[in-house]
Image (spheres, rainbow, N blue to C red):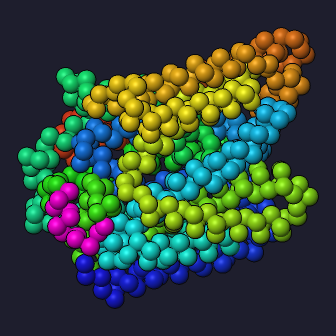
Amino acid sequence: MNVTALDWGIIAAFFIISLLIGLFTAKSAGSSAKEFFLSGRNMPWWLLGVSMVATTFSADTPNLVTDIVRKNGVAGNWAWWAFLLTGMLTVFVYAKLWRRSEATTDLEFYEMRYSGKGAAFLRAFRAIYLGVFFNVVIMATVSLAAIKIGGVMLGLSPVQTLLIASIVTVVYSSLGGLKGVLLTDFFQFFIAMIGSFGAAYFILDLPEIGSLGNLLSHEVVATKLDFLPNFNDPNVYIPLFIMPIAIQWWATWYPGAEPGGGGYIAQRMLSAKDEKNAIGATLFFNIAHYALRPWPWILIALASLVIFPNISDLQTAFPHIPADKLGDDLAYPAMLTYLPTGLIGIVLASLIAAVMSTLSTHLNWGSSYIVNDFYLRFVKPEATDKQLVAVGRISTVALMALSAVLALALSSALDAFNILLQIGAGTGLIFILRWFWWRINAYTEISAMAISFVVAIFFEVINPKVNWILIPENQAYLKLVYSVSITTVGWLLVTFLTAPEKDEVLLSFYRKVTPAAFGWKKVLDRYPAEKQDQGALPKELGLMLTGTVMVYAALFSTGFFIYGNMVGGAIAAVIALVGGGIIIKAWKNLH
């Protein structure tokens, strides 16, 4: 594609600003580990919320959405839309609990809620498992998207793309810490939004498309437009809608959509000024992530079905792309090659922003686990702040290098998404209940991790070869059902067969975070002096449902208007506004 001096100038300006932000925040970030990983625990909701949105606006996200839409239509997006339920549960139930814990990372939770060797093992193991291995896989999928974008739009080799993306990201992430990440995320968010909306607007005006109306009436596209799948075919509606809504959102663990909050979402909540700002940040994130961003990606994905109806068309158009990198997700960057001078520079900068914002967050988050939950806790408890920051910067570079190597071996963002869901299947319910049910212990979590991993390996690696459990090709969702069932039964058995945590540990945790007392009653009844505060959980669950309806209404209101259904759009918009009014009033009343 024709990238002019103007486009390169826009991209260069973006890189320079990102680096300057890292340099600007380097001094304060290097002053202490708390500054490097939590920005002094004094961040406002709007900055944290935008950072969460920027992080999840990864370069692989529009590729993933394109892959989904081309294969399963707009309704296929329920695979990730269903995680809104998890998000709203985090907003109204868990955000304040995380902030009250005053932990440095969410892994500190283990030695607050549990005790002994089991708690220590959990913290150490998950620091390496999540902070290194799992985190590297996530960053590799992001880097894979960068490889495809660089190859299609700039003709770069995979190695060239990774070198360019990695060096700048590592520099400002390692220098500026979380504050540098937050500020660059804020800048990158607006670049990314301008790029995606601008690209969608121009692509709809391409001669091959003609207009929005022409696109929606095209014979290939018209069958892909429904918000809900075909309920006459169980092989369609069960995997695309029933499974995500009924099981996936609460039963699986996925970064950015962890049941009960966790990972870099918890890191943002822990760095908030107070509980109100933690709630506001996660609320803004869920509104923007699910209601504001999807439609430009969806429209470009639908347009790609007109211009590149088959993967073979992509292969013909881009013969230099390696065969193992060809897939439906390649259609998104392929469509962007049609953009004009100037807009190409903005869109390329927006895609680079999407890559860098996600990588920088994962680098800082993974590094925080390595430093706080492994090095400081188990290797060198007497380490100074200067040493901790140094280890954090070294681990940042190492994580980026590992993810770049893995990215060269991956082929599809959707494949990676499905594998990650399978590995975490059945563990999500623990993350929801452990705050509210005293009986859960460290061995509950250890067993769930082990069982879910073994079951995932069985269904993804062993069973396809030996076929001990027949799973028809059109019923692959049964793997998730089996995995969740086996893992849940397993950890429940372990929970009741092992001893509960000691009362002093449970009481210490309860006093610190003050969750609703109903699940703690058996312990609290032994200590009459303890206040059994039932909390506002019923109200919080009501707000969760209200928030969910509000965001879905806003999402589909936009869709109805795009489809030309003015009445449906207006009705959905009114529902969204009413829900928003209720939510804003409840948030403002928080103290």
Counting every numbered tag in the picture gives 0
Q: Which quadrant would the N terminus be assigned to in this image?
A: bottom left
312 is within the stretch colored magenta: yes
Name the residue located 25 percent from the left edge and 23 percent from the top edge: 234
Name the residue located 80 percent from the left edge and 40 percent from the top edge: 120
Instruction: Relative to 91, say whether 36 is above or below.
Output: below
Can you name the residue that lies furthest to the bottom here? 5
Instruction: Relative to 8, say whether 483 is above or below.
Output: above
What percent of the width, then of the height, locates residue 23?
Answer: 66, 78
Q: Give the range drawn in magenta.
A: 311-322
Instruction: Relative to 380, say whether 500 is above or below.
Output: above
Lateral position of residue 143 relative to residue 149, left or right? right
| Residue 427 visible in the shown view | yes
Instruction: Relative to 114, say whether 519 is above or below.
Output: above
What percent of the width, then of the height, locates residue 275?
Answer: 69, 42
Can you name the residue that lies furthest to the front here? 466
Name the residue located 28 percent from the left edge and 56 percent from the top edge: 327
What percent of the width, then of the height, locates residue 319?
Answer: 22, 71
Lateral position of residue 69 relative to residue 173, left or right? left
| Residue 360 visible in the shown view | no
Which quadrant of the figure has residue 27?
bottom right
562 is within the stretch colored magenta: no
Which quadrant of the figure has residue 34?
bottom right
Q: Nearer the viewer, residue 130 or 273?
A: 130
Name the residue located 63 percent from the left edge and 54 percent from the top edge: 132
Q: Which quadrant would the C terminus be assigned to in this image?
A: top right
Q: Which of 325 and 178 is in front in this view?
A: 325
What percent of the width, then of the height, locates residue 459?
Answer: 44, 33
